[in-house]
Amino acid sequence: MKNMSFALLAGASLLVAGPHRALAIDAAAPPEPGVIYAGPPAPPEPMRTAYAERANLGGGFIEFLFGEGRPRGYQQQPPIYEPQPAYGSRRAMLPPMDPQQSEEANDPAQRPFDPKFERQVVDYRGKESPGTIVVDTPNKFLFLVQGDGTALRYGIGVGRPGFTWSGVKTISAKKEWPAWTPPPEMLARRPDLPRHMEGGPQNPLGARAMYLGSSLYRIHGSNEPWTIGTNVSSGCIRMRNEDVIDLYGRVNVGARVVVI
């Protein structure tokens, strides 16, 4: 009887242990099938990283979880691009620009003169009497009123912003190839200017000057004809030399000048 009890207990133990062993066997992954390569596999390319330095998190899964994909103290570096040849680009096939041509293109003296500033006869419907000079500052024209409903119109250069003015003056003096002495106010702004310059082709007053009353303003010529039609002077009325010579011969001292 006692032997039978031991046998029954042993059998029960085997029945209990049996399922656990079966579960352990089922849980084990089946072996991977072997793969035979024709040659040794090529090593994988090293992974490039944009990080300036690695974090001190130990790497691996912990760094991925707590580093948010970037190391501590990481600052993104701007990408460095290597210039590439512009293949097929029209610009790449152009010859280099001649420096002399580039300088000439930027030289104001090479700018064409606007034909609208050429001397011409125009209709005049104003109230000024013949022989009066009317200076239209905004449009950069000077009119010499004629006696038949017309006026001679000349292109002019006028004062820069802050140097324009308006009023009525008379021509107090006329000079051919005038000398030039910059006033103290101008020398304070431009200490590089000469203190005095005799008349001549290089003189900024040009070929003729007509002085306006007792002021420092003049109607005068210029050795920079490309400035006609611009705001360029310190208040004087600037003309091309050929135009100021023409006007000079048409007006007398005492002529009325209206600047608007």
Image (tube, helix red, strand yellow):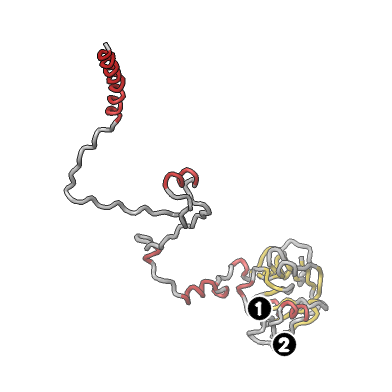
The residue under the point 42% across, 47% down is: 60
Residue 82 visible here: yes
Name of the residue lying farthest toward the front = 2
Element carrying mark 1? loop
Residue 147 visible here: no
The type of residue carrying mark 2 is: His
With respect to residue 59, does 104 lie above or below? below
The residue under the point 30% across, 23% down is: 17
Element carrying mark 2? loop
> Does residue 168 appear left or right of residue 237 in this picture?
right
Which quarter of the rendered picture does the C terminus lie within? bottom right
User: Which corner quadrant of the image does residue 230 belong to?
Assistant: bottom right
Q: Residues within 10 Å of mark 1 (few under 14, many from 20)?
A: many
The residue under the point 47% across, 43% down is: 65
Where residue 26 sits: x, y (%)?
28, 27
Where residue 240 sits: x, y (%)?
64, 76
**Badge 1 or badge 2: first in the primary sequence:** 2
Q: Residues within 10 Å of mark 2 (few under 14, many from 20)?
A: few
Query: What is the count of numbered marks?
Result: 2
Where residue 160 sits: x, y (%)?
70, 69
Which quarter of the rendered picture does the N terminus lie within? top left
Residue identified by numbered label 1: 222
> Does residue 158 appear left or right of residue 113 in this picture?
right
* Mark seen at residue 35: none
Where residue 58 sits: x, y (%)?
45, 50
The type of residue carrying mark 1 is: Ser
Q: Judge by depth and name the residue closer to the eye, 4 or 170.
A: 4
User: Which corner quadrant of the image does residue 157 belong to?
Assistant: bottom right
* Mark seen at residue 196: 2
Nearest-to-viewer mark from 1 and 2: 2
Q: Judge by depth and name the residue closer to the eye, 31 or 84.
A: 31
